[in-house]
Amino acid sequence: MKAMILRRTISLSDCDEPLECIDLPVPEPQDGEVLLRVSVCGVCHTELDEIEGRTPPPSYPVIPGHEVIARVERLGRGVTRLKAGQRVGVGWIHSSSGDEFENLSPDFRATGRDVNGGYAEFMTVPENYAYPIPEVYSDAEAAPLLCAGAVGYRALKLTKLRDGQRLGLTGFGGSAHIVLQLARHRFPNSPVFVFARDQAAREFAKQLGAEWAGDTTDRPPEPLDAIIDTTPAWKPIVEALACLAPNGRLVVNAIRKENQDIQELTRLSYHEHLWMEREIKTVANVTQFDIREFLPLAAEIPIRPEVEIYPLHAANQALVDLKRKPVRGTKVLVVNEESADC
């Protein structure tokens, strides 16, 4: 099978081709696992964190990719939930303890980091961590729902927002453009305020229904009850805290933060940013239950992710574009063209 592999950590500021395209044997499903023929795989910012060493794989080489849409090719012994030919998705959680807090468990294994992921024609996964995909979505549309959408859903739950309260989104890429659509459905009386450096991203947010959109350093017309941060930087954290109302909550939806602007934290003022019972909550991974809850909800709304298509062999270009260019929606790799429904 064709696969894009990562052999070592490397800075994407210095390297345009972090992944290598090679031929590998098709993996065998173990007991309780399914073999998947991958159709498409979304490209997530967490792949940048893996490649650049902020959340490095435990061993090399590894196949990245954790926003996977695939067809069940073969069943391992004991599989009962899925059937051959079924369309399923795989997210960041490849396997874990199976309990309510499996996202925090030491048993947590990440798809495309701790085990091989979806930048390949085939992959394996335990059947409990492969999810039926609603028919309303094409493969390419469905891919970002498995991470950007599902983790965004978890982040929105962690805000504890009530209908009518004001929500902010800082950073407006793959996850936030889905969360905006989700928030407008679940909290129809809650205005959404978007912070983004790129003017095109701000216009895109308004098109999707944002009440207001400004730069990261701008102040919204009124204090916000909750803000979700999806950026890789520290400056938006400090700026967001200054926009929170008393008792407001900042939810940081990021696996890791980059260190280029970590000095921004020296600007933190207890009185301005933290006092009045403001709080910070982080999102740690995602559970199978988040994904199972979110997918039918996304189809009911329906959420429409914006996607940009690349072929598998252009995975390096997709990653470099994600690192260096403004983001609109989610980038998606077409892995098996004959089976992908784009």
Image: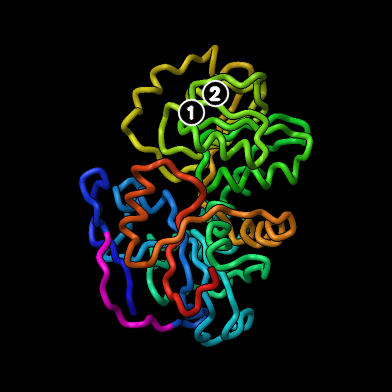
Residue at image position (71%, 32%) is 191
The magenta stretch is 19-28
Q: Is residue 171 above or below residue 130?
A: above
Residue at which label 2 appears: 241
User: Residue 239: where, in percent of width, then height?
Assistant: 50, 23
Magenta-drawn stretch contains 139:
no
Magenta-drawn stretch contains 25:
yes
User: Residue 138: where, in percent of width, then height?
Assistant: 59, 67
Residue at image position (63%, 69%) is 133
Residue 313 disc label: none
Disc 1 marks a residue whose amino acid type is Ile
Residue at image position (40%, 38%) is 257
Residue at which label 1 appears: 237
Q: Quadrant of the N terminus?
A: bottom left
> Helix, strand, or loop for circle 2?
helix
Left or right: where does residue 55 sit relative to residue 306? left
Disc 2 residue crowd, few under 14, some 14–19, many 20+, Cα 10 Å = many
Tell me if label 2 and label 1 are in contact, CB under 8 Å. yes
